[in-house]
Image (cartoon, grey):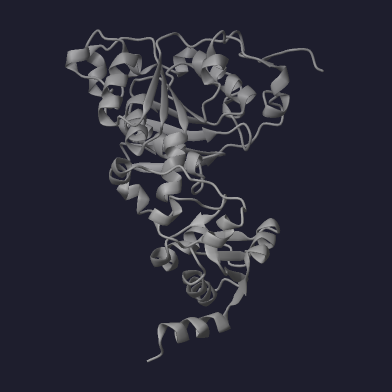
Amino acid sequence: MPSFRELLNATKAEIREVDTDGAEAARAAGAVIVDVREPDETDQGVIPGSIVIARGNLEAQIENRLADKSTPVVVMCAGGVRSAFAAKTLGELGYSDVLSMDGGFNRWKDEGREWATPTVLDAGQRNRYSRHLLLPEVGAEGQLKLLDAKVLLLGAGGLGSPAALYLAAAGVGTLGIVDMDVVDESNLQRQILHNLDRIGDRKVDSAKKTLTAMNPDINVVTYDQRLGADNILGILEGYDVVIDGADNFPSRYILNDASVKLGIPVVHGSIFRFEGQITVFDPLDGPTYRDLLPEPPPPELAPSCAEAGVLGVLPGIVGSIQALEAIKLILGLGDSLKGRLVAFDAMEMSFREYKIPVDPSNEVTYANRERIEVVELDGLCMPAFTSAP
């Protein structure tokens, strides 16, 4: 049986090794640093932009974190031993351009090169979000992104309730809620943020009590006011994603124009009787609400839930999908519903997908953002522009 030293020397003979100067040059040229130290080590400092995967998890997680196996990689540990074995493993997994950094993070840090103390989850957060941490696509890095994210919910009603609950549970750090209504007994069939004891309370207050009781990590910001052209830009600014739970066309159109002007993606949801629809409107990358509906339909073709009714569980399904799409946007995971509308029929238990093309005649675009004026719905809902520059 070979000794550890013999095994290490044999491994180093099979890989390419560089010193810290070479590693820094490779990083500057676009190589990715893969840090295989343990969490207690990386808590003390990391090289910015590194992919951090503990050595014991490398084989299971690296392909989800770095899919392109032709990407240049510099593997780093504390001193250069674990990185040598990790570099050999990456080669065996098909990564074609791998270097191991001799001297590791300890030498890198001692030489005064760039490093940073990372923001880390505390013990309680590691326990609370442990199932997220087990997902290679999320992990501690993704959970920190969620905790740093800001999501605004328009409405604390049927759609806003499940969306807010799941976003709060997921650890989205700041949740803004816009609603000027009070809790009514007829809400309780579907608006699961509220309960009998809160009938007559402001919905935003009831929502905040429920969400902060579920997760004290989060900050709930309430807007107990009518959403209008005069205040929407000030409310939206600073948020990363908006969940659209509005139940009327005026709110949807001013939301569209404000979100386009600010470049904020909107996760849209709507419900009617036994049917629901979900899509993502991203003004930076895809169609928006005015591409889907340039003008509002006549009122008789768009009755509200109060007029037409809604199956109570339906907004739970649609709102949960909205929360899922918001989390995907925050983490950059998977394929979002940008340019796609999913229609759910509860009676058939079916999902259908429709493409949403960009309307070339639509002038309310991010490219025209300086000309957009957010105005209340009027006439044919045509946008108001300032004079062209």
Q: Is residue 157 visible?
A: yes
Task: Residue lying at the far bottom in this picture: please name it.
Answer: 1
Q: Foreground residue, 331 or 44?
A: 44
Q: Quadrant of the N terminus?
A: bottom left
Tell me the quarter of the picture where residue 19 sits: bottom right
Q: Height in image: 250 above or below 75?
A: above
Residue 102 in which image quadrant: bottom right
| Location of residue 290 in the rendering, given as x and y in whole percent from the top left corner | 60, 25
Q: Which residue is drawn at the image coordinates 53% and 72% (left, top)? A: 87
Q: Where, quadrant-wise, is the C terminus in this rendering?
A: top right
Q: Nearer the viewer, residue 239 or 2?
A: 2
In the image shown, does 173 or 386 lie closer to the viewer? 173
At 52% across and 31% down in the image, what residue appears? 240
Left or right of 317? Residue 145 is: right
All told, the count of numbered labels is 0
Q: Is residue 104 above or below residue 385?
A: below
In the current view of this chain or complex, which residue is farthest to the front?
110
Residue 230's spot in the image, x, y percent? 56, 7
Residue 272 in view in this figure:
no
User: Which residue is at the far right?
Assistant: 389
Residue drawn at x 52%, y 56% is 51
Can you give x and y, in whole percent of width and height, for residue 285 in the image? 62, 38
Q: Is residue 26 above or below residue 300?
A: below
Where does residue 25 sit, x and y in percent of width and height? 70, 61
